Image (cartoon, rainbow, N blue to C red):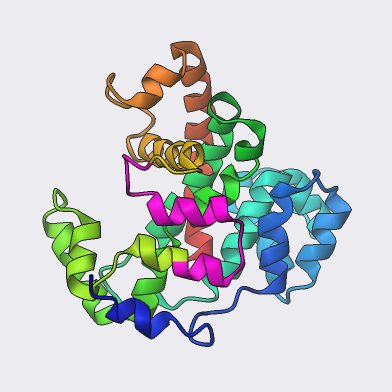
Amino acid sequence: MSTSALESLQDHDTLPPLPYVAHEILLAANREEPDIAEVSDKLAREPGLSARVVAMANSAFFAGQQPLYSIQHAIMRLGLVRVRVLAASVLLNKLFDPGRCPAFSAPRYWHDAIATSYTATRLAPHLAPSDTADAAYISGLLHNIGLLLLVHFFPGPMNKVLGEYGRRPEQSLVALTRSALGCDHGEAGRLLLKAWELPEPVVAVASHFHSPHYRGEHAELVHLVRHAAEWHEAGFELPEAHPLNRALPAAVRATEARHCQRETERLAAFARLLA
């Protein structure tokens, strides 16, 4: 396998650094549930971030409610889990410039990332042990981060790849990317998340998300996030033979689908604000 694209990214000085606040927010799910004051303090350390979160809490989706001005009240309205995902997304979004790749849709990317994160969090209690469930939200958010990295560093080749994939979506995006760059976005994601020193289960999801036959140490989490992404992409109606339908009773699927569909409407608005 040619590794020319990966070789050009090997130097950690080339890769975008993960801000300290983003690292703290992303890893918060692996610790005891923080209180609102703790999360507010973390968000306030990053200039402009608190204002973005407050703006999201005052967005059109919450029209009719009283305007609010403090980060604490914004967290109460949005919810801690949602604020963690949205705040981390804001910080990560600032690290990349996909504007030179017209075939890449930043709003769609962030919508899919945030929706996968939320859906994985909803599915985790039913499909994963507690230690795996703790990593569901961060793994869902970062599952396709390698694609964003490649678009940022190789906009010309990736524009051709994504253009071809858009014209013929039956093709494998992994194969098209590998043909153009000598690597795929799973390998790029692994390189980035290891440089960011994120936990190995999270790295495994980014690396093996597009490998349905992966049977490694973190297979439960990898498959959980992939099922969450596929469920979201299918509008929460999968073919009967899909593994998720066999894993969850119909009543549980129906309940979780309603929750996820309502959240998807919110997330679409937030992703537009983000991108």
> Could you say which quadrant of the image residue 88 lies in?
bottom right
> Closest to the observer: 268 or 211?
211
Q: Quadrant of the N terminus?
A: bottom left
Classify residue 207 by image quadrant. Answer: bottom left
User: Is 206 one of the magenta-colored residues?
Assistant: yes
Most extreme residue toward the left is 168
Give the x, y percent position of residue 62: 63, 45
In this view of the protein, which residue sits in the foreground, 192 or 116? Answer: 192
Image coordinates of residue 248 in percent, x first then y, are 46, 18
What segment carries the magenta color?
191-214
Could you say which is closer to the camera, residue 132 or residue 1? 1
User: Can I make out residue 162 in this image?
Assistant: no
Q: In the figure, 162 relative to 230: above or below?
A: below
Residue situated in front as seen by the camera: 203 or 36: 203
* Left or right position of 226 against 95: left
- On whether residue 197 falls in the magenta region, the answer is yes
1 vs 74: above or below: below
